[in-house]
Structure formats: structure tokens, C-alpha cells
């Protein structure tokens, strides 16, 4: 089979939108209801089978709190695709996606994105239509997920892998 390429991807968004939970659901198949906030950055790897090849994703989980903004920039370097995650139950997390996109583009100017509405198992306050419109305006796909149930999670990471692989 030869060497499997390692492709770095970033998962960004405000604290508490469920970035770590999405990554753990995908990589470990489990959900932990109580979580400690990510400090700085964390990463996990996972093999993804695409239709035309197999890749290994190096999935970088960025701490969402503002106090970590100063260190995040260095961790974007080498990224091939990014997920912009918001919580459908908290509209203010959606309103911050433009800031996250700008922060990533300052380091990786040609970065492809996927916009992700997480926590679809909760009462929605942010409209999917507005999120789709934002995604469309930046040339990104839009997906919805639930780290709790696992719904949409494989599609999210397969999309990141496809974007990162340029296929």
C-alpha cells in the first residue's frame, strides 16, 4: 500500500462549541459529557479512507478561549483544511466564525473551510439558513453534527480529509 500521507487539519471555534467532543467521538468513538477546556492545542490522528486513497489526518484541536489567540497562529502552519465549528444552541458562537476564519487565513491564505453547526441534539437558536449562507459566501461546505449522538461526525472528518487531500 505504500506510505500513507499525513494531512494536518484544524478544528477551530469558540470555547464550548464541542470541538474536542467531535474529535473524540470520531477518533475514539465515545462522548464524555463533562470536559475540561483544551489548554492551548491538542491533536489526534486518524486514518481516513477516501474513494481514491487512504490518508492519515493529524487533527489539531484549537483552544477556543481568547487568551490562547496569541499562541494559536503558530499551530495553523502546515494546515491543509479547517473546520469552523459553532454551537447551534448559542448564536454568539456563530457570530465569531468570521474572526476564526480571518485568524486562520492570516497564516494559511489558501485554506479551504467547512462550516459546522454542532450540538444539533439541543434546542436550536441559530438558523441553519444563515449558516448555509455564510458557508456559501466563503466557498465552504456546510454540515451539521452531534458529538453526543455521533450524527454527521464521520461526514465532517471525511470532508476535512477530502479538502486536505485536494480531491
Image: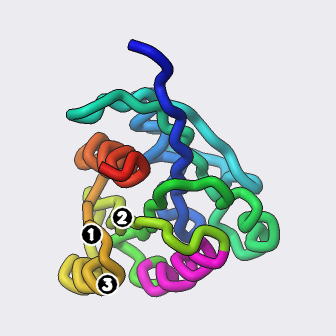
Q: In what quadrant of the picture does the N terminus appear?
A: top left
Q: Quote the CA–CA distance across marks 1 and 3.
A: 21 Å
Q: Quote the CA–CA distance across marks 3 and 2.
A: 11 Å
Q: Residues within 10 Å of mark 2 (few under 14, many from 20)?
A: many
Q: Tell me: residue 135, above or below residue 115.
A: below
Q: Tell me: residue 95, above or below residue 103.
A: below
Q: Viewer-nearest of labels 1 and 3? A: 3
Where residue 139 sits, quadrant-wise, is bottom left
Element on which disc 1 rests = loop
Q: Viewer-nearest of labels 1 and 2? A: 2
Q: Is residue 85 magenta?
A: no
User: Residue 127, can we see it?
Assistant: no
The residue that disc 3 covers is 134
Determine which of the numbered discs, if any, sits on residue 114 in the image: 2
Cβ atoms at labels 1 and 3 below 8 Å apart: no
Q: Position of residue 110 (x, y in %)?
A: 50, 70
Q: Earlier in the sequence, mark 1 or mark 2?
A: 2
Q: Earlier in the sequence, mark 3 or mark 2?
A: 2
Element on which disc 2 rests = strand
User: Residue 7, can we see it?
Assistant: yes
The residue at the point 35 percent across, 72 percent down is 89
- Find the residue positioned furthest to the front: 2
Q: Main secondary structure of the magenta part?
A: helix
Q: Which residues are magenta?
A: 94-106
Q: Position of residue 125 (x, y in %)?
A: 29, 80
Determine which of the numbered discs, if any, sits on residue 123 in the image: 1
Q: Position of residue 100 (x, y in %)?
A: 56, 76
Q: Is residue 68 left or right of residue 127?
A: right
Amino acid at each position: 500500500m505504500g506510505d500513507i500521507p499525513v494531512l494536518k487539519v484544524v478544528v477551530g471555534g469558540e470555547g464550548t462549541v464541542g470541538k474536542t467532543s467531535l474529535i473524540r467521538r470520531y477518533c475514539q468513538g465515545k462522548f464524555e459529557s463533562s470536559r475540561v477546556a483544551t489548554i492551548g492545542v491538542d491533536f489526534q490522528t486518524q486514518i481516513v479512507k477516501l474513494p481514491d486513497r487512504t490518508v492519515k489526518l493529524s487533527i489539531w484541536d484549537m483552544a477556543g478561549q481568547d487568551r490562547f489567540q496569541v499562541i494559536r497562529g503558530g499551530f495553523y502552519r502546515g494546515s491543509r483544511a479547517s473546520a469552523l465549528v459553532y454551537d447551534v444552541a448559542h448564536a454568539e458562537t456563530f457570530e465569531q466564525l468570521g474572526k476564526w476564519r480571518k485568524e486562520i487565513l492570516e497564516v494559511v491564505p489558501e485554506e479551504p473551510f467547512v462550516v459546522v453547526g454542532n450540538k444539533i441534539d439541543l434546542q436550536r437558536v441559530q438558523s441553519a439558513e444563515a449558516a448555509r449562507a455564510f458557508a456559501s459566501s466563503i466557498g465552504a461546505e456546510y454540515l451539521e453534527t452531534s458529538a453526543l449522538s455521533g450524527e454527521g461526525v464521520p461526514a465532517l472528518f471525511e470532508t476535512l480529509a477530502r479538502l486536505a487531500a485536494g480531491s
